[in-house]
Image (cartoon, rainbow, N blue to C red):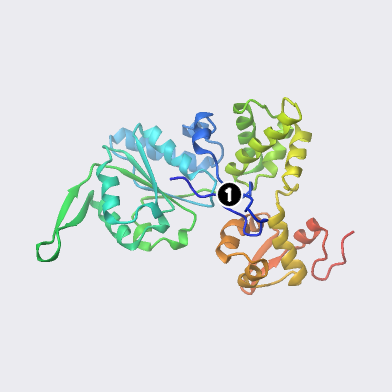
Amino acid sequence: MARKPHVDEGAPAGGRVRLVAPDAPEDAAGADVLGLRPTRLGDFVGQTELKGRLSVYVEAALRRGDALDHVLLHGPPGLGKTTLARILAAEMGVAIHETSGPAIEHKGMLAGLLTGLGEGDVLFIDEIHRLSPAVEESLYAAMEDGRIDLPVGEGSRARTMQFTLPRFTLVAATTRTALLTAPLRERFPIVEELTFYADDELAEVAARTAARLGCPATEDGALEIGRRSRGTPRVTNNLVRRIRDFVEVDEGTRIDRAAADRGLSALGIDRAGLDEADRRILRCILEQFGGGPVGIDAIAATLSMPRDTLEDVYEPFLLQRGFLVRTPRGRRAQPKAAEHLGLEGPGQPRLL
């Protein structure tokens, strides 16, 4: 199911999509046609230790002639959870059936998905933390016992019919592990976390994407894009597509460092990978709250931004890169943030 594009809450009227948002839309069909998505573990860039473990699990399952154990992938959006689910199905040589937690509205829909699986197939559920409690409880028996029970009839004639399911693998993805119930989490024998990517890994992604798009990138150009991609491959791919547009309009033939810098600057993405929304958050903390600490609700109210958007979309990168810290009393901007913005930090003279 296609994910709705994230709209910057503080954007001008019309709602401009943030290219650097990890949940920004990516043309999945186009990405697959162009070969931007890897189809094998060996082609997947980054997450080296995770790939090593997954390859062992796949090889062991194939040698036993068994289905792969159920897998839970968690981590920030845009790091490749959906791609890894597809890769696992390809490595196992089975079909994959994709859906999302909000799309499974009742037990009947879940039963339809499960009974439509072939032997050993992969069922991928994105945003599994958004399953309703009734659907989640029905999933327990499917995962553990290979069956699903459905009520048939009404009133005194109501009875429960049991459907036996083929062996299958549930691959689930979530960005909010804390919202998973303990009974659901414990039913996954394989639980793996995806982490942010290094700049050189994203440079490799950028170079591959640019080559596929027919606008090759130099080593310096790819690294410049990688440095400003917020540790997220989806952001890298989105930026390469837009920079390619600038290069083509300028009648260029490749993405070198100068072209990458011009395109990224035109997109409002600075050398630290921050866009205007990120800078607005840091300015708010530094200028209106003296650098903090300040509660998340106060920041959200000041910026007219939903709290969950602030926490899930904006904060992770600012925390990861050391511009922001969480304390028991609230969020606090680091001196690095003041220096980057040329603002006065707590107890510091104004930077000129």
Q: Position of residue 261 (x, y in %)?
A: 76, 39
Q: How many marks overall?
A: 1
Asked which quadrant contains residue 216, the reply is top right
Q: Position of residue 258 (x, y in %)?
A: 79, 35
- Residue at figure coordinates x 63%, y 68% from the top left: 300
Q: Which residue is mark 1?
A: 22
- Residue at figure coordinates x 69%, y 39% from the top left: 225
Q: Position of residue 114 (x, y in %)?
A: 27, 46
- Residue 298 horizontal side relative to residue 136, left or right: right
Q: Quick one: 106 or 329, which is closer to the camera?
A: 106
Above or below, comparing residue 208 to residue 299 in the picture: above
Residue 113 in sight in this render: yes
Q: Residues within 10 Å of mark 1 (few under 14, many from 20)?
A: many
Query: Mark 1: which amino acid?
Result: Pro
Q: Quadrant of the N terminus?
A: top left
Q: Quick one: 178 or 300, which is closer to the camera?
A: 300
- Residue at figure coordinates x 68%, y 62% from the top left: 324
Residue 37 in sight in this render: no
SS class of the residue under badge 1?
Answer: loop
Above or below, comparing residue 52 to residue 9 in the picture: above
Q: Position of residue 2 (x, y in %)?
A: 47, 45
Above or below, comparing residue 50 to residue 336 in the picture: above
| Residue at the farthest front position | 13
- Residue at figure coordinates x 73%, y 31% from the top left: 249
Above or below, comparing residue 118 to residue 173 in the picture: above
Q: Quick one: 41 or 140, which is closer to the camera?
A: 140
